[in-house]
Image: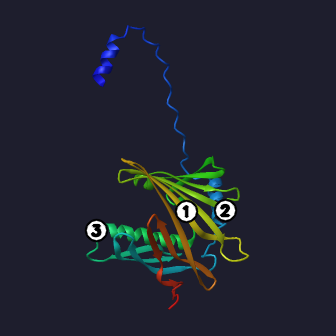
Amino acid sequence: MLTSLLLSLALLPLQDAPAAAPAQAEPAAPVLPTETSESVRQFLLDAEALLYDPQAAGLSSLEFDVPLDHPQAGHLGSAHVTWSTTAGVAVSVTTVEGSPVPASDAQGIGQMMGSQMVGAMLNKPITPMLDGGIAFMNGIEDGLVKVGFRNEQAAAQGVKEQALYFDDDGLLQRMLTVQEMQGMSLRINQSFVWRPVAEGRDVRIAASQHSDTTAETPMGPVKMPGDTTFTYINVGEIVLLGTISIKQGPMTQTITAANLKVNGQPVGG
């Protein structure tokens, strides 16, 4: 085909070369802030104040185990998680022998699941993103206020974009993550449904979460919708997340806080 095309061009009568189009200047890259402004920080603090805070109800420490049950690889071990207002979070992972997953990968899965569980129990999805990151207002999208985040450590791990979306009342509605991983581009949209922590209370806990993940692969885009539900327990005046159930396609994964201690005291039998 290429030879035939070149031959056809050679037989055409010569024409004056068209005038060169004026060079188009490359659009200037947006100038991103080098620090989070006080107004943006206050906006995010006010948004998180709409959510239930178990620490305000008296929570000062947590200790629990997360069984590492993978929907495809089976039981990988367990993660032991501790958290306190003074020492922060610590996760230690014990893996099982004979697992089809390499021990280093199982360690990573355990760290992720343990950190995800304790973060969800503390019900602070917003302000931890300020740790090591810069937040900035990024316009209005789909009628929601968009706040972008820039984090150099996340960028080094392939994260290209992170953003949170809020409604007119300042309540978190969506989260966007765009990341390069294992040669694929992943675009993850998460949306939230909130409910009051108790009747007559204004502060909220997550009722459910829906995600739409699009993976750009060499064979074309692959879409993976998912749904997450949450189960809560009451420990005195404190309401805590006990179980996260994630369903994506035919697979379901459950993350549970087992052998739970709250403020140093065992919970349940």
Extreme residue toward the right, this view: 200
Query: In whole angstroms, how far apart are the C-alphas of marks 1 and 2?
Result: 24 Å
Q: How many marks?
A: 3
Please give the label number shown on residue 102.
Answer: 3
Mark closest to the chain's N terminus, 3 or 2 = 2
The residue that mark 1 highlights is: 210
Mark closest to the chain's N terminus, 1 or 3 = 3
Give, as a three-letter code, the residue at label 3.
Pro
Give, as a three-letter code, the residue at label 1.
His
Please give the label number shown on residue 157.
Answer: none
Secondary structure at numbered mark 2: helix
Seen from the viewer's position, the closer of residues 258 and 220 is 220
How many other residues sit within 10 Å of disc 3, few (<14), some (14-19) or many (≥20)? few
> Residue 253 in the image: x percent, y percent?
44, 71
Give, as a three-letter code, the residue at label 2.
Asp
> Residue 17 in the image: x percent, y percent?
42, 11
> Residue 260 in the image: x percent, y percent?
49, 83
The residue that mark 2 highlights is: 46
Seen from the viewer's position, the closer of residues 121 and 230 is 230
Give yes or no for contact between labels 3 and 2 (Cβ–Cβ under 8 Å).
no
Query: In whole angstroms, how far apart are the C-alphas of marks 3 and 2?
Result: 43 Å
The quarter of the rendered structure image containing the N terminus is: top left
Query: In whole angstroms, how far apart are the C-alphas of marks 1 and 3?
Result: 30 Å
Q: Nearer the viewer, mark 1 or mark 3?
A: 1
Mark closest to the chain's N terminus, 1 or 2 = 2
How many other residues sit within 10 Å of disc 1, few (<14), some (14-19) or many (≥20)? some
Q: In the visual, does 11 lie left or right of 160? A: left
Seen from the viewer's position, the closer of residues 42 and 182 is 182
